[in-house]
Image (tube, rainbow, N blue to C red):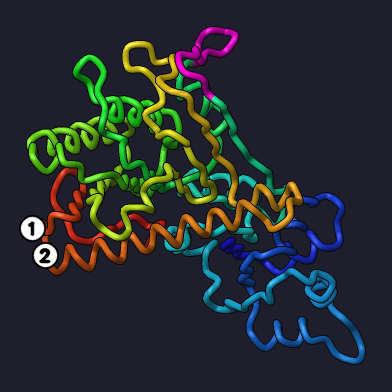
Amino acid sequence: MLKIFSEVSAIEDIYVSDNYPNWQKVIGNQANIYLNIDQASLVTALDGDDDEESILFMWYHENDAAKRPEALGAQFQYANNEELMIDEPYGIFILDVSEEKANELSMKYGIQIYSAQNLVDIQDFEIDFDFEENETIQCPAGKLKGFQFVLDSFKSEKSNSTIIVDRNLFSNEEKSLNLGIDNMIRYFDTILPTTLDAPYEILFVTENSRNFQLKPNIRDRVIKDLTKHIVQLREYYINIEVLLVHSSTVIFKHTHQRRILKNYHFGNSEHGFAIFSIINPEKIKNDNDFNLQAHYHSLLKEQTGIISIKKRNKLFNRLMEIKTEAEKQLNKQGQNDRYYRLFLNGDESTVITNRLLN
């Protein structure tokens, strides 16, 4: 589900210009578009009249896959009330601000924001690696290792939230150190924005394993160590949630495929996200396929069925099922529920707060 909040002039410019081939594909297929226009004016523009057909009319009626845009009118206050954008974590904004201001706001909130005054084309993004066991991952210069190398091209991508689903993330150790914790510290140290004026929110969905049930001290240590080390990576506030799902629950099957969801990207790691050795961080532990791509990746590649959007929506729907079921049981049983355990910054909780699911 793509959500684009835009000035009418930007949609018109995209339609009439040859400078925005990617934007043309995005706004012409599947996107939910919300315009800075009142409802009456939008109806007039889209339905046309006997005298003249507007540019908006021609764009909408010449793109069979385009969804009818909605009018926000007086509610379109994003340029003047910046924090409203945080409530739209999947939103892509084209605002009537300078390019400099758009870049400033984008960095400030970890959101994709474009200038309608000096619009640039939206860009595709994909990382795709096929790792082999014991393979060494190191760039030619010998400086970037492990997740640093894999995610180096991701550093400029905007985000303020992440969800990672990996049932076995914290199941293995190397030299008495937890493999999942070490890999996640390196992962987030690579991709977290340097600065952010909003809390960065992270949710881990993993297994409430037998070991965690029998040894809650080990479970608590893993969660507290994970939280402590990631929070220390940046000076801004980082909100970390860990949801433990028991294998006997009906939604446990949703945690089998290792998935990642971000504001504008999603991906998978076939055999989990604990990819790299602790002792040798450039070394692959097991064979693994790792992929991360923009939600609209296959749309720009003109692949049949718009595969990336379907996969992203499937992941989102499964996560919502997990959230709904877990919160229902946690609110009923609290932490006495053996099937679910939820921790917020190391403390027990009953409500998932990650903005990607709210």
Q: Where is residue 105 shown, x and y percent of the image?
A: 52, 49
Q: What residue would you read off at disc 1?
A: 336
Q: How far apart in space, not on screen, are marks 2 and 1 (Cα)? A: 6 Å
In the picture, measured across the screen, residue 245 lies left or right of residue 54, that is: left
Residue 273: give its label. Answer: none
Labels 2 and 1 touching (C-beta < 8 A): yes
The residue sitting at 43% across, 45% down in the picture is 257
Closer-to-camera residue (78/295): 295
Tell whether 110 sits left or right of 46. left
Give percent across and percent down for residue 343: 19, 49
For the record, the magenta segment spans 131-144
What residue is at 34 percent from the left and 55 percent from the top? 354
In the rendering, at what x and y percent does residue 274 appear? Answer: 36, 29
Could you tell me which secondary element the residue under label 1 belongs to? helix
Q: Quadrant of the C terminus?
A: bottom left
Q: Amino acid at mark 2?
A: Gln
Eyeballing the image, is 222 above or below 161?
above
Residue 236 at least partly seen? yes
Say few, some or many: other residues with alpha carbon within 10 Å of mark 1 (under 14 / 14 to 19 / 20 or more).
Answer: few
The disc labelled 1 sits on which kind of residue?
Asn
Q: Residue at x 65, y 61 (%)?
A: 96
Secondary structure of the residue carrying numbered label 2: helix
Query: Please, is residue 200 above or below residue 187 in the view?
Result: below
Dividing the picture into quadrants, the one containing residue 248 is bottom left
Say which of 142 and 305 sits in front. Answer: 305
Left or right: where 213 falls relative to 136 = left
User: Residue 275, located in which quarter of the rendered image?
Assistant: top left
The residue indicated by pointer 2 is 333
Identify which residue, 274 or 187, lies in the foreground. Answer: 274
Q: Looking at the image, can residue 194 be seen? A: no
The answer to which image quadrant residue 311 occupies is bottom right
Residue at screen point 24% across, 23% down: 173
